[in-house]
Image (spheres, rainbow, N blue to C red):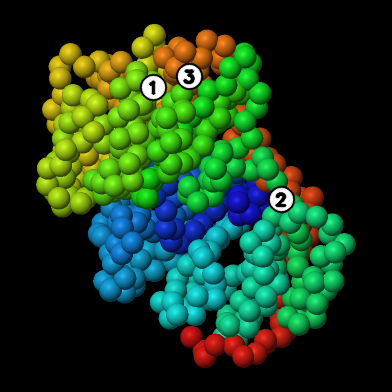
Amino acid sequence: MLTAGICRWLHRRGVKVAPFKAQNMSNNSAVVVGPDGRGGEIGRAQAMQAAACGLAPDLRFNPVLLKPGSDHASQVVLLGEAVDTVTAGNYRKLRPRLAGTAFAALAELRAAYDVVICEGAGSPAEINLRAGDYVNMGLARHAGLPTIVVGDIDRGGVFASMFGTVALLDPADQALIAGFVINKFRGDLGLLQPGLDMLRQVTGRPTYGVLPWELDLWLDAEDSLAYGRVLGRPAAPHGTDWLDVAVVRLPRISNATDVEALATEPGVRVRLTVEPAELAAADLVVLPGSKSTVADLAWLRETGLADAVLAHAAAGRPLLGICGGFQMLARAIHDPVESGQGSVPGLGLLPIEVTFDPHKTVRQATGSAPGDVPVRGYEIHHGYVSAADPALPPLLRYADGTGEGALLGAVHGTHWHGAFESDGFRRRFLTEVARLARRTGFRVAPDTAFAAARERSLDLLGDLVEEHLDTAALWQLIESGPPGGLPFIPPGAPPS
């Protein structure tokens, strides 16, 4: 979020700026059309940061994306294309190729833009990983980058964390740490100031600012861990009824941002849950995307959530499956690729079968919903509908008229991510959900625009940077690089 804010600040100054994250680990990705016309993936956070820069997403903004499929293995997406699956063991063998690709991408961006703002990943003081690091201090050392350590004070222990981060780095790494920023502060800044003063005394480095906690910053979350129980701050309904939306927080949930657009609508309360009882009270239940469809379906059954979903559907109440969640609604899933489990029964709520293919579908999509309502979205999936009842109506249609997804009574399914960012389709869908749920007093707002809400969020980030950070000092770092004469803080790590 801070990277996006700095990018927005610079963009508003007329600077040609781009974001960069050498390696991201997230199942929340965005589709980018590469130079060859094919679709590729980057972290959704980097797509959001690109928007802060006024740019279309670029595969070089996030050259390496790791998409966890389990606690021990991740799919490797290199410059947008899935190339391998790695574990902690074989990752080491692939790492030189990944680092080389990341360094080359950064060099290209630095040649094409005035400024590149590089986001790290995790902590720069992960000393057990430093030898092979190319995302944090490994990247900073390679490119000679001035580096700011950002601390989340809402989690507590921020001063110890910042001091300890510097003190665990070797001398060459420490020489690049220019200072600190504190994020998510609530309270009286005067009470914090003695700590800031002492931090400067013991590290010889300034704090460039303290960013306040801001409730309105929740769109385009990096992953579902960024969400609380309820998304955003639900606005009062236009009518007399609220719509209650329960989204199942799957263990390998992907593209959880699909439901953020629903949460921007007044009178729509969207919450993530793992409680079967909460599904019973919901007007709409959503099964979101998953990086591990078969494994997460098994988890649904183990936790009793599958029974709650089936009961919800049996009562004729609205149900929506998106991508992996759509696949779970099938009669059968044939998966020799992602899980390797072969054929397993789905929830049986749609008369379709899903088969997984080694080739991954990654593309942007345009089309329409019934009534010629325009819809845009994107697809990222290995599974495809391999068999379906020919009488089953589609939920959407591609621009060429081909059907996509499925609609059976109150059960809706689609492979498209991002479809609800299309304002007309979102309003039409929520109106239908209210009818099926018998929320006769619910009315969609006529003027909610998701794209405008995203722009307001990006502008708010830029405002926070301008108002609360020492932007003159940041500009000095951009122009001059790491300050000279920064003191070494013992004990320091052995030279890397």
> Which residue is at a point 76% across and 68% down the rendered structure image?
207
Question: Marks 3 and 1: which is nearer the front?
Answer: 1
Question: Marks 2 and 1: which is nearer the front?
Answer: 1
Name the residue nearer the viewer: 471 or 453.
Answer: 453
Image position of 313 with respect to 80: above or below: above
Q: Which residue is mark 3?
A: 430
Q: Which residue is mark 1?
A: 318
Q: CA distance from mark 2 to mark 1?
A: 36 Å
In the displayed structure image, the side of residue 492 where residue 286 appears, left or right = left
> Which residue is at a point 53% across and 23% down the rendered structure image?
243
Question: In the rendered image, is residue 399 in sight?
Answer: no
- The amino acid beneath tag 2 is Trp
- The amino acid beneath tag 3 is Leu
Q: Are marks 2 and 1 in contact (CB under 8 Å)?
A: no
Q: Position of residue 174 (x, y in %)?
A: 62, 81
Q: For label 1, count other residues whose C-alpha is less than 10 Å away and answer few (under 14), some (14-19) or many (20+).
A: many
Name the residue nearer the viewer: 404 or 114.
Answer: 404
Q: Quadrant of residue 441?
A: top right
Q: Position of residue 421 (x, y in %)?
A: 49, 28
> Which residue is at a point 67% across and 69% down the rendered structure image?
157
In the displayed structure image, the side of residue 479 where residue 496 appears, left or right = left
Q: Which residue is mark 2?
A: 213
Marker count (numbered): 3
